[in-house]
Image (cartoon, rainbow, N blue to C red):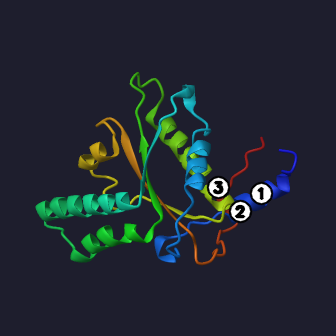
Amino acid sequence: MANLTPQSISEFIRNRRSIYPAMYTGEKVPANIVKEMLENANWAPTHRLTEPWRFVVFSGEGIKTLANFQSELYQKKSKESGTYDESKFEKLKNKPLLCSHIIGIGMARDPKESVPEMEEIAAVSCAVQNMLLTASAYGVGCYWGTGGVTFYEEAKPFFGLKPEDKFLGFLYLGMPKKWPEGRRKPIADKVKYVKD
């Protein structure tokens, strides 16, 4: 902690970026970095120590397993509803193959339901932020997306989740071709102060 200053922490946080699979080089992210991302996720704030985050890490042939699962589930569901789109099917089948690793993000509901669901989702989000910042520290590109099968109830068992749990999307990982510039509107536009 001695080397950290408030200024260096602020600069580090402001340098984090969402880096999409199309921006990856194809180089594999070292396994020790992925492991450290997961360890740091485990130190997120958690209400009543429920530690609701659950992760499934796909790499190698496992990425093809995920790609096949999500594209086939999309095909089945969308054909039933009459909304099938061949280009979306192809994207779900091929986009994962651009990644080094993909981490499925779940929220396991506390059996006692003693913590409001919103607080459990917030805890998982903090865990994901820890992973994003760790990846950024190593120059690894990351993107948290909620596309594909994220909101299909039928997808939950594939990720080891029960019906009462939530699946919160995917963290895509890869080595970036370049580190993009950031864009934010001024914080003053988003804050109201109440002093009296």
**Viewport quadrant of the C terminus:** top right
Residue 93, horizontal then vertical, whole percent: 29, 69
Residue identified by numbered label 3 = 133
Q: Label 2 near label 3: C-beta < 8 Å?
A: no
Q: Residue at x 55, y 53 (%)?
A: 34
Q: Amino acid at mark 2?
A: Arg
Residue 165 as seen in the image, left or right of residue 177: left
Residue identified by numbered label 2 = 14
Residue 54 as seen in the image, left or right of residue 138: left
Label 2 packing within 10 angstroms: few (<14), some (14-19), many (20+): few
Q: Label 2 near label 1: C-beta < 8 Å?
A: yes
Residue identified by numbered label 1 = 10
Mark 3–mark 2 Cα distance, whole angstroms, equals: 10 Å
Is there any visible trace of residue 188 in the rendered image?
no
Q: Residue at x 66, y 71 (%)?
A: 182
Residue 129, horizontal then vertical, whole percent: 59, 51
